[in-house]
Amino acid sequence: MCKMETETMTFTDMVHDRHKLKQPTKVLLTLSNVLLPKEKITSTPSMLDGLDFETEVDLRIVGCEWIQTAGILLKLPQVAMATGQVLFQRFYYTKSFVRHPMEITAMACTCLASKVEESPRRIRDVINVYHHIRQVLNQKLITPLVLDQNYVQKKTQVIKAERRVLKELGFCVHVKHPHKLIVMYLQALGFEKHQSIMQMSWNYMNDSLQTDVFVQFDPETIACACIYLSARKLQIPLPKSPAWYCLFNSNETDIQDICRKILKLYLRPRVITEDLERRVEESKKEYDCAKEKAKEAIVYPVVQTDLVIPTPNNGITAAVPRNISSTTTNKKPIKKRSRSRTPLEIKSRSKSPRQLKKSKKRKLVPTYRDYKDYKDYKDYKDYRSNENYKSKTRNYNYRKKY
């Protein structure tokens, strides 16, 4: 006989296992799914569509400036403005400036960021603010936006662009900002009362949003780079042995790369928005022309298999294409089966005399002639309550005569 071994479980173990089964599944969202590799940064969708690198960088800078200015006019918190700029940068690493206009996407990112940071703004207000920004930049007479068909069309474009941004980012719109980290790191380094280094680090952080550092590096490294730049600018010494940034899981190489990107931003010349839009339109025309030429150049292959038919005269075979009929007999085309019912089916489904009698019988519903001779509906009601009427209600001929 074989012996079965049984394991004894206490009541606490059973409760613990039951609790483990009831735990909901957790979704872990980290920054690893939003940081882009260098290969994707060097070959962007805009560059693949014919836009040069410098124009794309200028478009990113102008778009982030518009989001920052619109956030100030809309009285949004700085966190919402930073979120909008990061979403803007992420989106254009998956889509092209040639196919998706920069202004509409900036509006969509502003609306989306305001909702993410729980400070929602109406789309109408966002469109009005961007209309005002464009008039100021182009040095035109400031006029209010007219609510015409163009406004309705632009509003629809913004709504669609907002959905497109969500779809392309996989609805992962969480952004971890380094602004709070700067304050914590300066407190750890003993500079909590030094307002100048804290304010300068905060300014460098806001300016770095116009670059692509937020899609390449962790927020901890970006915060260390901003503190490093501020300390060098104000000539404040920081601990070197051991290095202060090692305490915050950062390395010197990444910090120097971020500092170079931020400093290059201040060396770039000021660009005019109309020139950028003109370059984008030229690239768009070239893209459309290349697309049309590619469609015209497509040659659909025609496969012709030949049938070999022997001739009765000399036995020599001739090749005949398959689409040519090899016979001369006139065969009638096969008719498709009709979906209509045949007379036999109609006859088999015909109603019996009793059913026909029931179907022809008129429904006994009150009509105008039932109470046309009565002055009031009350008199008609009294007439209907009469027993003589009740006994003859089912008689169709009686109703017809009446």
Image (cartoon, helix red, strand yellow):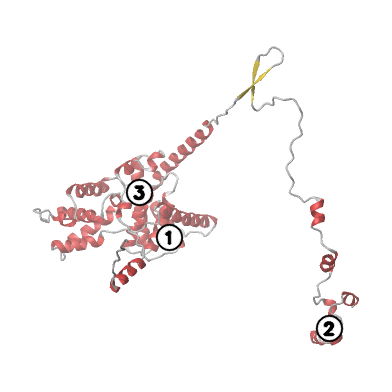
* Quadrant in which residue 354 is drawn: bottom right
Q: Residues within 10 Å of mark 1 (few under 14, many from 20)?
A: many
User: Cα distance, mark 3 to mark 2?
Assistant: 86 Å
Instruction: Give the residue at the far left of this rendering.
Output: 241
Looking at the image, can residue 332 be seen?
yes
Q: Which quarter of the image is occupied by the C terminus?
A: bottom right
Q: Nearer the viewer, residue 352 or 165?
A: 352
- Are discs 1 and 3 less than 8 Å apart at CB? no
Quickly name the residue at label 1.
126
> What residue occupies the far right of the structure in this picture?
401
Going by the numbered disc 3, the residue's amino acid type is: Arg
Q: Residues within 10 Å of mark 3 (few under 14, many from 20)?
A: many
Across and down, in percent, residue 260 comes to: 22, 46
- Can you say whether 258 is above or below 391 in the image? above
- Please say if 369 is above or below 130: below
Residue lying farthest to the front in this orientation: 1
- The quarter of the picture where residue 371 lies is bottom right
Say which of 198 and 5 sits in front.
Answer: 5
Residue at (52%, 57%) from the top-left corner?
152
Name the amino acid type tagged 2: Lys
Q: Earlier in the sequence, mark 3 or mark 2?
A: 3
What residue is pinned by disc 2? 390
Q: Amino acid at mark 1?
A: Val
